[in-house]
């Protein structure tokens, strides 16, 4: 289990833990790579390489962040640095790979760009094959003065790249050319959420018919139907991630669909909880089940372990990871009692070392 962090007095980079998917027990390995602000991680499909978004704004004298490539030692879990390239925009906060593992994509939150990079044979990154800049902004002048892309991922058929822009209140869809690593606007090029909602992250249902976006400012989840043939999204329903009557400050962060497609999870920062929903098998509609305290402050990220039996919450402001057991029948979360120290954790990714 790799954990990306925000570096500072307590953190020096990427940390690792051995995780038993049968028992949920985790053992610290320690620091496996020193690198600046590796706030989001991605593993290639062969699980030989790890890529980190270095969320910085000054890379080699340019107003940009960076993307770092590492080779994974499948026995020890240690990481070997391969190379680093400019992310072509400040504050990269997300990194992903296409379905073939031949391209890495990133979203530069502060720079307003999304970019694509080729993966070379040895896992290193080449120079960008696509950089797309948006100059528009949203309805809220206090929080949407820039486009603010926060996620970009490829569709399961590798034909479309979907990106969420907090500053535009839009999900943009690009056609992806896997031969050249380029992005072109789909038709239509985007779909909207409510003004000021600020769509942060999204998750696609394993059945590939529904997409769920968690809205940072609205503290809500909006469901879209997804037309895989055309890469188009149609809005369906919106549900709150907060208890009725909650008056405190809150922003949402991460969202995941359980691998079996029955449940949906979203994190609240402020309420400091995971909101749990059951998904209607026919319509995909989320139905609220429970709020579960994350056992820490500001759960920026969480991940469902391989096999779907455990959820690990990364509490950024309390420097810990909390492990929950997932009930396979009901989707309910139960804390296992295991709490791991982790400095300013921001992302969790798993690699099978066997």
Image (spheres, grey):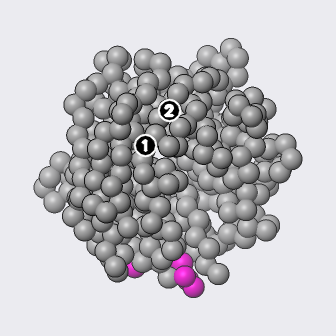
Nearer-the-camera pick, 248 or 85: 85
Q: Position of residue 241 (x, y in %)?
A: 64, 28
Label 2 packing within 10 angstroms: few (<14), some (14-19), many (20+) = many
Q: Is residue 208 above or below residue 59?
A: above
Residue 308 seen from this side:
yes
SS majority, magenta: loop
x then y, percent, for residue 155: 49, 50
Q: Quadrant of the C terminus?
A: bottom right
Q: Report the side of 333 relative to 81 (left or right).
A: right
Q: Write down the residue under mark 2.
A: 233
Q: In the rendered structure, find residue 162 and report the number of the disc placed on it.
A: 1
Provide the residue span drawn in magenta.
74-81
Left or right of 68, for residue 26: right
Please identify, in this view, whether the residue under mark 2 or under mark 1 is nearer the observer.
2
Label 2, label 1: how far apart the Cα atoms are:
10 Å
Tag 2 near tag 1, CB within 8 Å: yes
Identify whether 268 is placed above or below 303. above
**Going by the image, does 183 lie left or right of 242?**
left
| 33 inside magenta stretch | no
Q: Secondary structure at mark 2?
A: strand
The image position of residue 73, as x and y in percent, is 50, 82
């Amino acid at each position: 289990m790799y954990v990306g962090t925000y570096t500072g007095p307590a953190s020096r980079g990427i940390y690792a833990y051995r995780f038993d998917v049968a028992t949920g027990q985790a053992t610290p390995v320690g620091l496996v790579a020193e690198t600046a602000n590796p706030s989001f991680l991605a593993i290639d499909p062969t699980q030989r390489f790890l890529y980190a978004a270095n969320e910085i704004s000054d890379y080699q004298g340019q107003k940009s962040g960076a993307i770092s490539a590492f080779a994974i030692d499948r026995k020890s879990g240690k990481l070997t640095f391969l190379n680093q390239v400019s992310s072509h925009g400040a504050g990269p906060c997300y990194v992903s790979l296409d379905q073939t593992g031949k391209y890495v994509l990133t979203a530069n939150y502060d720079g307003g760009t999304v970019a694509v990079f080729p993966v070379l044979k040895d896992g290193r990154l080449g120079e960008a094959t696509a950089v797309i800049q948006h100059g528009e902004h949203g309805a809220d002048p206090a929080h949407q003065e820039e486009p603010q892309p926060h996620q970009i991922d490829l569709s399961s058929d590798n034909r479309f790249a979907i990106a969420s822009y907090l500053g535009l209140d839009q999900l943009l869809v690009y056609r992806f050319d896997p031969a050249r690593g380029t992005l072109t606007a789909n038709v239509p090029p985007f779909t909207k959420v409510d003004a000021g909602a600020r769509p942060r992250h999204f998750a696609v249902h394993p059945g590939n018919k529904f997409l769920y976006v968690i809205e940072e400012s609205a503290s809500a989840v909006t469901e879209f139907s997804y037309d895989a043939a055309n890469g188009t999204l149609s809005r369906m329903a919106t549900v709150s991630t907060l208890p009725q009557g909650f008056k405190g400050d809150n922003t949402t962060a991460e969202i995941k669909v359980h691998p079996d497609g029955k449940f949906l999870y979203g994190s609240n920062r402020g309420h400091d909880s995971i909101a749990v929903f059951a998904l209607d098998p026919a319509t995909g509609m989320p139905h609220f089940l429970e709020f579960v305290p994350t056992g820490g402050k500001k759960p920026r990220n969480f991940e469902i372990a391989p096999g779907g039996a455990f959820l690990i919450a990364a509490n950024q402001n309390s420097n810990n990871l909390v492990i929950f057991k997932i009930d396979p029948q009901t989707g309910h979360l139960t804390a296992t009692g295991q709490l791991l120290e982790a400095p300013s954790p921001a992302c969790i990714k798993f690699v099978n070392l066997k």
